[in-house]
Amino acid sequence: MQPKGTVDIELDVVYKDVVIGSTVLDQFNLLPGHNVMEAEFRYQPSDANNTVAQEFISSYLSSDEPLPLTVKGTSDSSPFGSLQTALSHVTLGTSLTGTHTSLHSMFLSAD
């Protein structure tokens, strides 16, 4: 993972047991009560030649099915020592639905 800013949280995104990128919460401000936060998925496999990472991006582009993902925290997920232990125990199941976009149709519709 890259070094964190003073208020960023970064969690690993895992597909079929391979880290394929991260979920980033910029401007992390945890307040008492219910919190709603925007997060950004960044596809950044450590090895672009990894067949699982390639399968993910191929499925995302060619399928309209949900792709199961796991969002996992690590001790590096936060620059705040008080959050590092807690975030290292975070594991969330989620999915990302493919775009079902063919490269052929993308080029045909380009202006």
Image: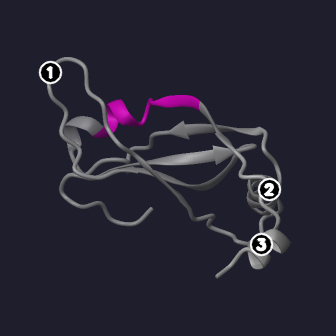
Q: Give the distance between the C-alpha atoms of the residues marked 3 and 2, in whole angstroms.
A: 9 Å
Q: Which mark is residue 50?
A: none
In terms of image quadrants, where is residue 35?
Answer: top left
The magenta span reads 84-93
The reply to whether the magenta stretch includes residue 2 is no
Q: Dot 3: what SS?
A: loop
Q: Give the distance between the C-alpha atoms of the residues marked 1 and 3, in whole angstroms.
A: 43 Å
Q: Nearer the viewer, residue 100 or 9?
A: 100
Q: Residue at x 60, y 32 (%)?
A: 94
Tag 1: residue type?
Answer: Pro
Q: Give the distance between the C-alpha atoms of the residues marked 1 and 2, in whole angstroms.
A: 39 Å
Residue 88: % across, % down: 42, 36
- Above or below 3: residue 56: above
Is disc 1 surrounded by few (<14), some (14 to 19) or many (20+) residues within 10 Å?
A: few
Which residue is the extreme one toward the bottom? 111
Is disc 3 surrounded by few (<14), some (14 to 19) or many (20+) residues within 10 Å?
A: few
Tag 2: residue type?
Answer: Val
Q: Which mark is residue 32?
A: 1
Camera-nearest label, 1 or 3? 1
Which residue is the extreme one toward the top? 33
- Above or below 110: residue 102: above
According to the picture, the residue beneath numbered tag 2 turns out to be 52
Left or right: 1, with 63 as reference point: left
Q: Residue at x 76, y 54 (%)?
A: 56
Left or right: 45, with 66 as reference point: left
According to the picture, the residue beneath numbered tag 3 turns out to be 49
Residue 31: % across, % down: 15, 28
Q: Quadrant of the N terminus?
A: bottom left
